[in-house]
Image: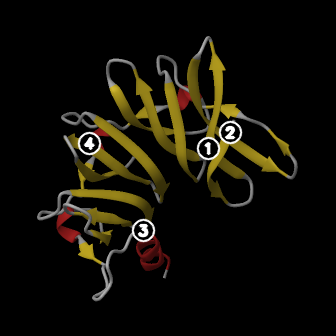
């Protein structure tokens, strides 16, 4: 089984391919040059990881996560090969995930504590991590990045969800939720950045 999760231009797709071996499920992150009907699969799966997935692709790089037994999920960045992996995971967090990238930045979220997720921003290294989580919200996620801005959503308990826009810091948070609507999510935020 395989999935396409993101497309860049007309010739790059990232996703995951799943294979079973000895009843164990292994998920591989992959990047494929899409040349009409012929595909070349490049495994991005890092050594030591039992699972990896790529969610975003742009400018010759891929963003996703790798699961390392005993360590948890780690946001990662690839440049077209498994050996190019950069571990983006910031210290002090249990798990991290990268979902999109563009203009030298990567976005996703980190698991801060039980049930508390924080939108995350990186610029190619773990030490560049910025916690985008705005005060007053229980959880936040970043799903897209372009032109120095990040989009996603914030949530409160039990189900309040508002589209969100950042410009590189938690203090730059803008609530994009239109009055009179029950909830908004990333589609409204994507349009805000796509202008």
- Tell me whether circle 2 and circle 1 mark residues in contact (CB < 8 Å): yes
Q: Is residue 16 visible?
A: yes
Which residue is pictured at 37% across the width and 33% down the height? 74
Whichever of callouts 3 and 2 sits on the residue coming sooner in the sequence is: 2
Q: Say which quarter of the image contains residue 171.
A: bottom left
Q: Is residue 194 left or right of residue 80?
A: left
Query: Mark 2 sits on what residue?
Result: 2
Real-space CA distance between mark 4 and mark 1, rounded to the nearest whole angstrom: 22 Å
Vertical comparison of 93 with 20: above or below: below
Q: According to the image, label 1 marks what residue?
A: 15
Residue 2 placement, left or right of 141: right
For mark 1, does the 10 Å Cα neighbourhood hold few (<14), some (14 to 19), or many (20 or more) residues?
Answer: many
The residue sitting at 38% across, 51% down in the picture is 108
Q: Earlier in the sequence, mark 4 or mark 2?
A: 2
**In the figure, 50 relative to 16: above or below?**
above
Which numbered disc flags the more N-terminal residue, 3 or 4? 4
Q: Secondary structure at mark 2?
A: strand
Question: Which residue is label 4 attached to?
Answer: 111
Label 2 neighbourhood size at 10 Å, few (<14), some (14-19), many (20+)? few
């Amino acid at each position: 089984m395989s999935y396409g999760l993101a497309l860049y231009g007309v010739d790059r797709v990232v996703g995951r391919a799943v294979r079973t071996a000895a009843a164990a499920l292994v998920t591989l992150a992959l990047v494929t040059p899409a040349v009409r009907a012929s595909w070349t699969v490049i495994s991005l799966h890092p050594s030591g990881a039992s699972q990896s997935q790529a969610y975003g692709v742009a400018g010759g790089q891929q963003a996703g996560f790798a699961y390392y037994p005993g360590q948890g999920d780690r946001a990662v960045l690839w440049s077209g090969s498994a050996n190019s992996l950069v571990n983006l995971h910031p210290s002090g967090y249990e798990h991290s995930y990268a979902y999109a990238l563009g203009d030298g930045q990567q976005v996703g979220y980190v698991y801060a504590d039980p049930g508390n997720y924080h939108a995350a921003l990186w610029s190619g290294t773990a030490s560049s991590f910025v916690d985008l989580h705005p005060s007053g919200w229980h959880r936040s996620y970043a799903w897209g990045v372009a032109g120095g801005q990040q989009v996603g959503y914030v949530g409160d308990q039990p189900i309040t969800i508002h589209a969100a826009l950042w410009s590189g810091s938690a203090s730059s948070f803008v609530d994009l939720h239109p009055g009179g609507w029950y909830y908004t999510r990333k589609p409204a935020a994507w349009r805000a950045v796509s202008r």
